[in-house]
Amino acid sequence: MTSLRRYAPFALLVATQMVLVLVAPSHGSSGGTQLGGQFQGGPAASSGVPGSGVSGAVGTGAPGTTGVPGATGTTTGATGTTTGATGGGGGTGTLASGTTTGQKFCVTGLADHLPCVPKWAGGDNGGATWPGVTGNKVTIVMYRPKDNAAVNAILQKSGSYTDPNVEQQMLGVVNDWINKHFQLYNRKLDIKYARGTCDIAPPDDTCFRNDANTLVSTYHPFAVFWDSDTNEPAFFDQLSRKGVVNWGGWAFTDQFAQSLRPYHYDLFMGGDTQADITGRWICQRLANKNAKFAGDANLKALPRKFAVTYPNTATTTPSAKRLENIIKGCDKNGVVDSPYSSDTSTAAQQATTNTAKLKSAGVTSVVWFSDVIAPAYGTAAQSAQNWHPEEVIAGEGLLDYDALAQNYDQTEWAHAFGPSDLANSTGIDKTDAGRIWKGEGQSGSANQNSNLLTSYALSVAGGIMAAGPKLTPLTYEYGMLTMPGYNSWAQWHDPTLIYVKYGKGDYTGVSDIREVYYDPNKSSPTNGQRGSYVALNGGRRYQVSDIPSGEPSLPASV
């Protein structure tokens, strides 16, 4: 990679800037158990970035890492300046590199109000600044693992399974739209669609590392995103060690992304922030009161006793323990620990055993800090054992998505409520996926599940726009972490929007919640089938600091 050697001074300049913005975490700082074993230390503990044997700046804000991989050589390049103007997404960011015109560039045509950036003055974009980047192209890969038959059967039941060919078509449409509407500094995005060889339930770390290696050797991407991973960290760890920016990993502990800086990001709320906001919600709204929303009369009369159900992995367990400690700190009855293994071959038996354990322990309220498949097995086991507790959702990883909740036992899930990360549901035509589909002249409507991949693709592209013309992982990180938050309730009062904010030590986006309950008889706006979450207070959204006190006002049937 000798062509990269021209860019070291620029990388070091940006690294120096980044030390100033990465000194302390914003929301969702780790403060908990560090990852052990193969994940501790991140890419800086390995051989570094291809073509480089040295480090850039010391990563003072990233526990578990000694530095940010850099490059060697010489170059010239101007740093970006801020215009001071405010725009659609709550402000104008600071380009990590390049001269600007003093005006702003804003993406239009979306429901989301992405932050504007300073308008580039044109000129040299640095050419091949990193693997996957040339003077006219940035290569990105969307990854999809091998389909799991058991998971597919659950998803197909409610129409939430998407055929790979349909997904690939939508990705191409989104790619074309981004290239027409984003400021990409004389480059175009080339987003490839890649199907992997690995099964996600249970995940095999070696297989996913091999898939990551194959993606890098085949496509040489600047970035890779996987829009539906809940329990496989090795894939992202391997990409980071290869010097590839990567997105995915729902609700992983914040320490994971911090240890892999400047490479790893996710759109969904980080696990530690999810624990903090869910824990505060439980303490403010439910703790030390009777379980009045349970389905069994005897449980309704009892003081709440919580159990936290979560996938037992290195990247999810620390956040679950964090949530348990918060609940223990405010509720006199404590909390029951309820981990499970993400393995569809044993899921039914695990659910039967765990349900019997919780029932025997006197649990009244199950807190689902889980992936979206676990409640399908868990509620079936509850029904079989004639046990109907409160089902408290933690709002993470699409657990609050109508089409997925329709797969759970509807008698049990009729008692589901809690904080939700998603916005109020709308038909697909009103989402960004639907708008882009129509904007590109496609007939009919986009696939009803296509807004997930669309949101990830837009987020990845947003980081490229914020990075400026001299695109490297360091400028990408600087752009992401200095990007203004957007879509806040305080500014827009729109229940179809979610507040997205990255920041110091914070590599995950979603940063607020609404309150919901599940109505098994309500028709869903997402697919027209029975079963939908209903928002309280018109979909009013709350950050961790402004969650109200007192029990939520739910229908008597919940």
Image: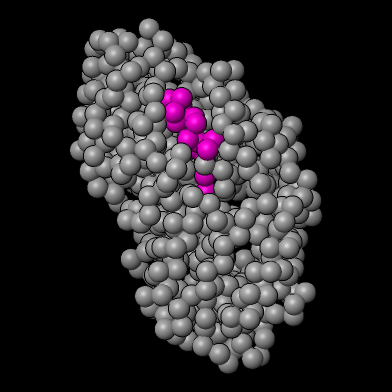
Quadrant placement of the C terminus: bottom right
Q: Is residue 84 left or right of residue 483?
A: left
Which residue is painted at 63% across and 53% down in the image?
342
Residue 479 x/y as whole percent: 33, 34
Give whichever of 119, 368 is nearer the camera. 368
Which residue is painted at 39% across and 70% down in the image?
326
Quadrant placement of the N terminus: top left
540 relative to 22, above or below: below
Q: Is residue 289 left or right of residue 450?
A: left
Query: Is residue 230 at all visible to an observer of this figure?
Result: yes
Task: Choose top left, top right, bottom left or bottom right for residue 504.
Answer: top left
Residue 101 x/y as whole percent: 27, 24
238 relative to 340, above or below: above
Give whichever of 118, 457 is nearer the camera. 457
Q: Is residue 196 left or right of residue 509?
A: right
323 relative to 131, above or below: below
Which residue is painted at 74% across and 52% down in the image?
345
467 relative to 405, above or below: above
What span is in magenta? 234-251
**Per the image, is 236 magenta?**
yes
